[in-house]
Image (cartoon, rainbow, N blue to C red):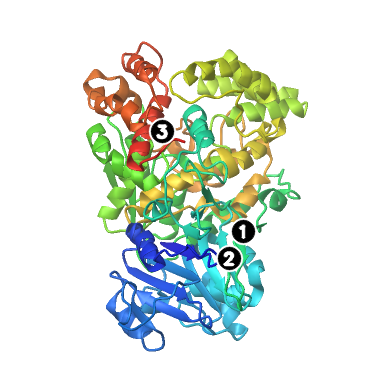
Amino acid sequence: MCGFSAIIVNKKNKKNNLNFKVEIQKMNNSISHRGPDDEGYFELANKENKKKYYFGDSTPKDVIDIESKDKIFNHISYDEKNEICETPEIILGHRRLSIIDLSTSAHQPMTSYNSNYVIVFNGEIYNFDELRLELLNSGMKFNSNSDTEVILNMYQKYGADSFKRLKGMWSFILLDLKLNIIIACRDRFGIKPLYYFFDRFNNIYIASEIKQFFSLSEWKSILNIDRAYDYIMYAQTDHTNETLFKGVFQCPAGYYFKFSFNPESKTINNELEFTKWYDLEKNIKNKNNSKIDKNKLLELIHQSNREHNISDVPISYCLSGGIDSTILVMERSKNNTNNILNTFSIFSDDKNIDEKKWVDEILINSNNIINHSRIPKLENFLDELDRIIWSLDEPPCDSTIYSEWSVYNMISMNKFKVTISGQGADEVFGGYHNYFSSYLLYLISRFKIFRFLREFYKIKKIHNYSYIFLIKEIISKFLPDFYYKIKNNFKKSLNTLFCLKKTKYYKLNKNIEREKLIGIKNLSIHQIKYSMLPKLLRYADRASMQHSLEVRVPYLDHELVEYCLSISDENKINDGITKYILRKSCKNFLPIKIYNRIDKIGFEVASKKWLTSEEQNIKIKKYINSMIDDSKGFFNETTLEYIKQTMKKEIGFNDIVFRFIFFSVWMRVFKINIE
């Protein structure tokens, strides 16, 4: 797990006289948290494709000693006295958190053994040992035991088709000096980030985090109004390739983009050519697992959990007390009885959302699990709020981010570099309760009336929903346009809370058709690609890496995801119970109380109590009082009145209040301007 920076210079613009060595240093230094173990740079100069290698202040001495034997290797800020400093064509920067192959041989930027390819890589390839053996048997050479070099050699042998052979999470930039192209690739589900930005000279900047652009000489923080509306009104971010920063884009999951440079004129073609190398729907289209194969599912979970434990440093687990993380922990505990598993949990002083009794149940049923826990406090949250917002690049949609931040902080303080999370299981197995209405509508659309009536009754009885609530939820899926127009009256009333004028009816994700909301599989695909998983993955990446910690997500192994999405809806919700096949497959090693658990909490904080308790909310008032100034007038007095009414319990609690706070802090921290 690492971070990288890249600048591709537009030499055609004669006014383009920036000092790109300084720019790349600033970009790299702003993500030192992503890679405190090592630092490196590569430059392609404009004379005879001349290559240069640089080190930085964080580069270990033994790396410098080894590298300098066969490369021009100086400090990035150093130039020989009589050297003419030429503007580079391409310059790459890298920060390394050493997890696989801790030796100096895995230093990045990494060059292939034949010097035709250069890479900066962020992530993990879990099948790299298998691929490495295959490549060795075919005669290819290796200088390291790293997964990074496997990507280089796979590309050298198979080109871009090699990406389909990789299992894991990644983003990388690969420089092909043979074909004179640059490729930037992102993994199947967007677990690892990949951003890009063009300045006024048409230089291209590529980064692991948006804040890297903040340090550039040509950077201006401008609000993307449409995405701001999505965030405030619909709690949506990361659902398009745009960001809340105008002009900053992210490469979509399962895509790579490339551009070329002319080896003779040494000019860059700044046109980005995007290729969709992974198609989730296509990979599950012809599969139909209507029959339950519990052994197959269990085998896939075991395989993914085992592969995600491949590491040269110790590994920990996040443990919420829910079924998803419990399965990963108990499965690992069962198959590694001689090893102690360190788990980390977040509890609450609000008994309604406290997970302690569930975690205790897990500990009772195992003798090789150690648990570390913490209760997040409001005063600590507020003390760290600016840093949290800065780390995330874009504001979070609710206050649960602090529980996630707290658990990563606790893991890091216990000297772990890697942790494993149950994230992704809800989207893959249909674990959220909003899947109920999609499932019921699916049964109606298939004329399965008796099954519909049974499930309708069971869902109402088990989860204590009213008939009216369930009917409204079904209507929201069956007639989304009509439903959203009714709900738009509420949205119009919220419009008065901020100075953002919308002249026409606004509908989120206009390309979403009704059919995509009918059935668990369709809703899962939508949540994986757009509405849920992308923002949760951003939270996990930024919050963990701010603590120099790598988060791994076994439920997002692509073979597991594809298999689960091909399972029939009836095997995911059965008699009102979610994740039916997952529970059945893992019943033998799950504590019985966890197996039968039907409520859903996860890593929660007492946000409602913080806001509505007079003793607590006095601590939040300083953020509310500065909201108008911090947001540069985006919010108004009506906003403040709405928040005060919520705090006094005159109106019902709505998490939009925390979005108001987070958004105004974000605008201040990132010095956002409104055009």
Element class at badge 3: loop
Q: Can you tell which mark lies on residue 398?
A: 3
The image quadrant of residue 256 is bottom right
Question: Pointer 1: what residue?
Answer: 272
CA gap, disc 3 and disc 2: 35 Å
Q: Is disc 2 placed on a helix, strand or loop?
A: strand
Q: Name the quadrant of the N terminus.
A: bottom left
Residue 338 x, y percent position in the rendering: 36, 62
Q: Decide: is 105 above or below 233.
A: below
Distance between the Cα atoms at labels 3 and 1?
34 Å
662 or 598: which is nearer to us? 662
Residue at image location 34% in from the left, 73% down from the top: 76
Q: Secondary structure at mark 1?
A: loop
Answer yes or no: do the residues labelled 3 and 2 have beta carbons within 8 Å?
Answer: no
Which circle, 2 or 1, is nearer the viewer? 1
| Among the two numbered marks 3 and 2 on one chain, the one whose residue lies closer to the N terminus | 2
User: Label 2 amino acid?
Assistant: Ile
Q: Amino acid at mark 1?
A: Leu
Neighbour tally class for label 3: few under 14, some 14-19, many 20 plus, Cα within 10 Å: some
Q: Are marks 2 and 1 in contact (CB under 8 Å)?
A: no
What numbered label is drawn on residue 183?
2
